[in-house]
Amino acid sequence: MGEGLSVKRFLPRGLFGRSLIIIVAPIILLQAIIAYVFFERDVDTTTRRLARDVAADMAMLVALEDTSAGADRERLRALAARQFGYRIHFLPGQNLPPLHGALTSNIEIALDDILEQRIGPDRDFSARRTGDDFEIKVDVHDGVLAVLVPRERVTVSKPDIFILWMVLSALILMGIAIIFLRNQVRPIERLARAADSFGKGRAVPDFKPYGATEVRRAAQAFITMRERIERHITQRTEMLAGVSHDLKTPLTRLKLALAMMPDDSDTAPMRADIAEMEHMLDEYLAFARGEGGEESTLTDLGELLRDTAQAAAKARQREDIVITAPEHVMVSVKRAGLRRVLTNLVDNALKHGSRVKVSLTQDERLVEIAVEDNGPGIPENRREEAFRPFHRLDQGRNLQSGGSGLGLAIARDIARAHGGDIVLDKSAMGGLKATVRLPV
């Protein structure tokens, strides 16, 4: 099990890389098997057969040297050179020197073995490579017979050509496979990018299914799913907008009726209740709208964060807020929705803390906006509870006091519509730290 996991670490994670391995690995394995069979089996067998023929020729030449004399011997030697294609030299009165060093190639070993069988173990001989050819020397009764044998008579001619063709054919096949795989994987990559953009709340109007049948079906299913989600969001927004409009009509009549009445201890609470009901209706509509129909635009988050935090601090007449945000952090977001998120978080921090810090950081994958304060905070086991819609914390810090219980729910809904999230943690300042994480 551990070895399987260690191997998986070295495998590519992408579909293109894994598919390429599925095609390339058998090609490489097949080439290796062919090379082994060719060099270790066929080449060796063919070499031994050719060496056997050369050894037979040498045996005949030695026999001619031993049985003929004078002019006949030279004439037969010249005739054999023409017929066999060898270059033959006779070195009278010489003897072969002792052999030094081991044989270095399979061809030399094959020649040595077969020559010993054909001309006998008692006769001294040597077979060595000389340039591209092989020189065979054999002791005869009155000297040394030196025969220069062309390389193609002893071994397969140009085996490197075979290797070259084998490698070239493998490269051509792999090139075709790469082109084919790239065309097959590209629709899947495009579908993944479209799903990622949709998950981040960004429009993908130019996405169309293409590619293999299965990919087209997946792409069409994605388009259908996207349309259903968008239709659901639209219907939810329209329903809550209709309810809000219907409820605001009688509230408007009540406000007009109260406006005609004198200000006293009876009408003041009624006006406060009506104002609270209007605020709650606006909150419900904002929660139902969620990401709404706003389009994503390239936005400088540093500038947006500074403007939003300063506006929230000014509304509460506070100056004890520290803002740390670099310049030109450009991300495609729904500007109005993200401003609402930041306004909710900063306003809650100002409401419950005497000191507030807002910071923006960025890496290759994420942008993080942290809002910290030195307030009472929220217990760890109740932080997720704070995000529940229409829910107010009964003890400890109440981020939604005096509201409808939708502030954090709306903020997280908008953040998740951007493909991100909001997490709560303990701040180094002693209070609560709310972090908005958005994908780049």
Image (spheres, rainbow, N blue to C red):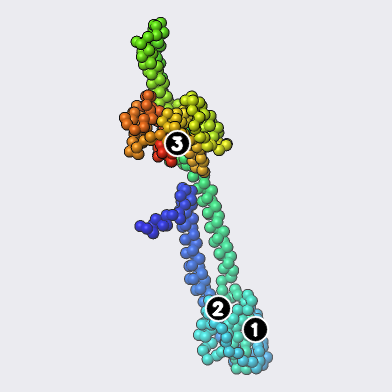
**Contact flag, marks 1 and 3 (Cβ < 8 Å):** no
Query: Residue, x 57% and y 87% (percent of image)?
Result: 99
Upstream in the sequence, badge 1 or badge 3? Answer: 1
* Residue type highlighted by circle 2: Thr
Which of marks 1 and 2 precedes in the sequence? Answer: 1
State the image coordinates of residue 423 (x, y, percent, origin top left).
41, 37
| 395 versus 258 height, above or below | below
Marks 2 and 1: CB-CB under 8 Å? no
Mark 3 element type: strand
Q: Residue shown at 63%/81% (left/top)?
A: 148
Q: Is residue 197 visible?
A: no
Residue denoted by label 1: 88
**Residue identifier under label 3:** 372
Q: Quadrant of the N terminus?
A: bottom left
Which residue does the numbered mark 2 point to in the structure image? 104
Task: Name the front one of labels 2 and 3.
Answer: 3
Q: Earlier in the sequence, mark 2 or mark 3?
A: 2
**In front: 433, or 155?**
433
Tell me the CA gap for discs 2 and 3: 78 Å
Which residue is at 50% across, 48% downward?
Answer: 181
Tag 1's secondary structure?
A: strand
Dot 3 amino acid type: Glu
Q: Between residues 333 and 204, which one lies in front from this camera angle?
A: 333
Q: Which quarter of the figure has residue 349?
A: top left
**Label 3 Cα neighbours within 10 Å, binned few <14 / some 14-19 / many ≥20:** many
Q: Secondary structure at mark 2?
A: loop
Q: Residue 231: x and y, percent?
A: 41, 26
Using the rendered image of the protein, determine whether residue 323 is visible from the camera's viewpoint: yes
User: Residue shown at 62%/87% (left/top)?
Assistant: 145
